[in-house]
Image (spheres, rainbow, N blue to C red):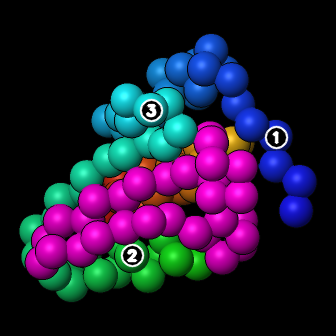
């Protein structure tokens, strides 16, 4: 698959359209923590996001601890950020808003 790397300026522009996502210091990934009321809400969020990730063929690095989910998005094939990272971030934000 051919992925187009985003330069630093493009990544910063994309980041301003997202709520609460942070650019990692290396500039190759974005990060966000999502917190829910309980485990089942967090698990439901992960299940919905897994479907979005599969549709995009772009899968997150994530960690779940009870009601909290930490998400790291990067494009492993390019070792950088691409538009897919931001598409998945937007899908995750929408899924989160539906639950809160």
Q: How crowded is mark 3: few (under 14 residues within 10 Å), some or many (20 or more)?
A: few
Up-down: is 30 above or below 64? Answer: above
Q: Residue furthest right?
A: 2
Residue 4, numbered circle: 1
* Residue 28 horizontal/vertical position (percent): 53, 38
Q: How far separated are the C-alphas under marks 1 and 3?
A: 18 Å
Judge from the rendering whether residue 37 lies leftward or rightward of residue 93; answer left or right. left
Residue 46, numbered circle: 2
Of the two numbered discs 1 and 2 on the same chain, state the one appearing first in sequence.
1
Judge from the rendering whether residue 8 lies leftward or rightward of residue 45; answer left or right. right
The mark lying in front, picked from 3 and 2, is: 3
> Which residue lies under the disc numbered 3?
26
Range of the magenta residues? 53-81
* Residue 87 horizontal/vertical position (percent): 63, 49
* Residue 52 horizontal/vertical position (percent): 60, 69
Judge from the rendering whether residue 72 lies leftward or rightward of residue 1; answer left or right. left
Whether residues under marks 1 and 2 lie with C-beta atoms below 8 angstroms apart, the answer is: no
Q: How far separated are the C-alphas under marks 3 and 2?
A: 26 Å
């Amino acid at each position: 698959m051919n992925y187009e790397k985003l330069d630093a300026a493009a990544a910063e522009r994309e980041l301003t359209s997202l709520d609460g996502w942070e650019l990692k210091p290396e500039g190759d990934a974005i990060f966000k923590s999502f917190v829910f009321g309980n485990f089942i809400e967090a698990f439901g969020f992960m299940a919905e996001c897994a479907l979005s990730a599969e549709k995009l063929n772009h899968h997150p690095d994530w960690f779940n601890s009870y009601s909290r989910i930490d998400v790291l998005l990067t494009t492993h094939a390019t070792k950088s950020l691409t538009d897919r990272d931001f598409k998945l971030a937007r899908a995750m934000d929408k899924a989160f808003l539906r639950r809160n």
